[in-house]
Image (tube, rainbow, N blue to C red):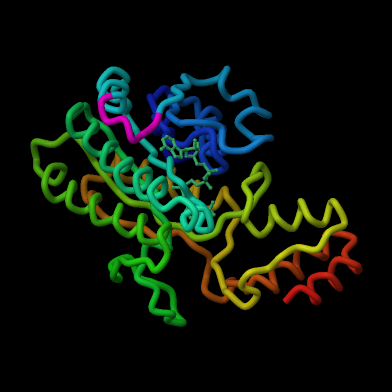
Amino acid sequence: MFANIYKNKKVLITGHTGFKGSWLTTWLIQLEANVIGIAKDIPTIPSMFQKLELETKIKHYQEDIRDLSKMTEIISNEQPDFLFHLAAQPIVSTSYFDPIETISSNVMGTANILEALKTSNHPCTAIIITSDKAYDNVEQVWGYKEDDKMGGKDIYSGSKGAAELIIKSYYHSFFKSAKSNIKLAVGRAGNVIGGGDWAKDRIVVDCMVAWSKGEKVEIRSPDATRPWQHVLEPLSGYLHLGSQLYINSAFHGEAFNFGPKAEQNHTVVQLLKDLSVYWNISETDKAMKQDY
Ligand SMILES: NC(=O)c1ccc[n+]([C@@H]2O[C@H](COP(=O)([O-])OP(=O)(O)OC[C@H]3O[C@@H](n4cnc5c(N)ncnc54)[C@H](O)[C@@H]3O)[C@@H](O)[C@H]2O)c1
């Protein structure tokens, strides 16, 4: 898989203790990569990171990406062949309560990773994960193209849009040069679902928690449409992107969107109805209807 490119390679993942990060770590272990992780904490209890005992299978650094000297030290010492940057404050609702945590982690944290890569200048293929929320949301009905304008009306979205501008400027200022050993691409995806997610304020997790207690689930935007996809779909895209960036000299400095076909987009309500088929839901379905 992925042209066997990850076998015996050093792969650094930031945010490896989170939902997507622990799946990516697991996948890369299967691909026989030597995985190194940086994360400031284990964001949920329980967590897939702990359930799969990933700490015993990789080199684990508990550090904050806002600490530039630490990031520089780790990246210079470890000299990873690949880097997947996922660490972020990823929850929109949290960004209203703690804008500075969100901005500092998502914008300055990303800048620190790029700066540490630049300082190390060891050959490295870096995939930086932002979000489809990085776009200026103009409520268009068709999907966003890779080069549409960045923006963001809430703090989380704005932080991801700002991170994109910083990534672009690092690329043009430093990594585009023939002297640079760093190859770079951005990966954007929308809402991701799947086992191993225990984060609050994510619709599927909220449903499972509420329904398993026989409670109603609170729905904020029932008619909002999101490009839901299973967690392994964007991760396969990120891994494919990493392998192509490594092999193919034509790729460098671009962003790639990973999402389902437009006709597969679902509203929140439709998602809940589909979920309810797999749950003994007649009572809950009634509860859902009362809630919005
Ligand atoms: N889950 C989704 O639906 C979704 C959708 C679009 C984009 N994304 C993006 O994918 C990435 C991973 O998301 P997730 O759902 O796995 O998140 P998560 O909350 O499950 O994990 C976040 C990870 O980042 C680490 N982290 C956060 N702030 C940090 C800091 N300052 N220093 C070091 N580590 C820090 C946490 O320790 C954890 O390992 C994020 O960049 C997120 O914005 C996620």
Q: Is residue 105 left or right of residue 197?
A: left
Instruction: Please state the horizontal and vertical placement of residue 268, each as a whole percent of the image.
Output: 65, 70
Compared to 139, does 39 lie above or below?
above
Identity of the residue drawn at 45% across and 27% down: 37
Q: Quadrant of residue 48?
A: top right
Instruction: Give x and y (percent) for residue 142.
Output: 44, 79
Residues in magenta, as a range: 64-69
Taking the view exactly as shown, the residue that stands out farthest to the front is 97
Closer to the camera in the image, 196 or 2: 196
Answer with the quarter of the image where residue 14 lies. Answer: top left
Residue drawn at the location 62% of the way across and 38% of the way down? 44
In the image, residue 67 lies in the stretch drawn in magenta:
yes
**Outermost bottom residue:** 141
- Residue 136 at x, y = what percent? 35, 71
Q: Nearer the viewer, residue 288 or 18?
A: 288
**Residue in the foreground of this view, choosing between 267 and 157:** 157
Up the image or down, 134 lies above or below 118; here it is: below
* Position of the C terminus by quadrant: bottom right
**What residue lies at 58% left-to-right and 74% top-to-bottom?**
224
